[in-house]
Image (cartoon, grey):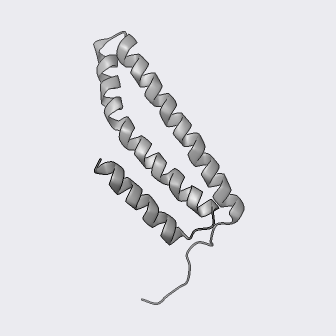
């Protein structure tokens, strides 16, 4: 196999900042989702709604950790760190949160 070069052009500073802003918005959406599910667990009208809320509440912490890792990654990229460095930091954070 021969080397064909970089498949994708590197992201510009504007694109990196945009992705960082999207990650901030995503964490807000996840926290809103958590709040809605907690309300549904208490005020659910049917047993099915309450059990669906319980299942969702199990998944939410993992989703929050994922978004926190992505937020850290894009924050480091905005600060000028390389993809390699930012990716290592993100993976270390995920490992730390997973083994908590």
Looking at the image, residue 35 sits to the left or right of residue 59; the answer is: right
> Residue 92's image quarter?
bottom left
Q: Total number of numbered labels? A: 0
33 up-or-down from 49: above or below: below
> Which of 94/50 is in front?
94
41 up-or-down from 28: above or below: above
**Residue 7: percent from the left, percent from the top?**
55, 75
Residue positioned 28% across, 51% down in the render: 99
**Residue 61: percent from the left, percent from the top?**
37, 38
> Which of 99/49 is in front?
99
**Residue 15: percent from the left, percent from the top?**
67, 59
> Residue 50's image quarter?
top left
**Residue 13: percent from the left, percent from the top?**
69, 63
Residue positioned 31% across, 34% down in the render: 58
Looking at the image, residue 56 sits to the left or right of residue 84; the answer is: left
Residue positioned 39% across, 11% down in the render: 43
Which quadrant, please, contains the N terminus?
A: bottom left
Residue positioned 71% across, 59% down in the render: 14
49 up-or-down from 92: above or below: above
Q: Residue furthest right?
A: 14
């Amino acid at each position: 196999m021969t080397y064909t070069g970089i498949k994708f052009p590197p992201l510009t500073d504007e694109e990196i900042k945009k992705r960082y802003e999207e990650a901030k918005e995503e964490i807000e959406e996840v926290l809103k989702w958590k709040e809605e599910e907690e309300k549904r667990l208490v005020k659910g009208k049917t047993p099915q709604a309450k059990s669906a809320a319980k299942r969702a509440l199990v998944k939410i912490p993992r989703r929050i950790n994922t978004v926190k890792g992505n937020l850290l990654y894009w924050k480091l990229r905005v600060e000028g760190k390389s993809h390699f460095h930012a990716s290592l930091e993100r993976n270390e954070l995920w490992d730390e949160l997973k083994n908590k």
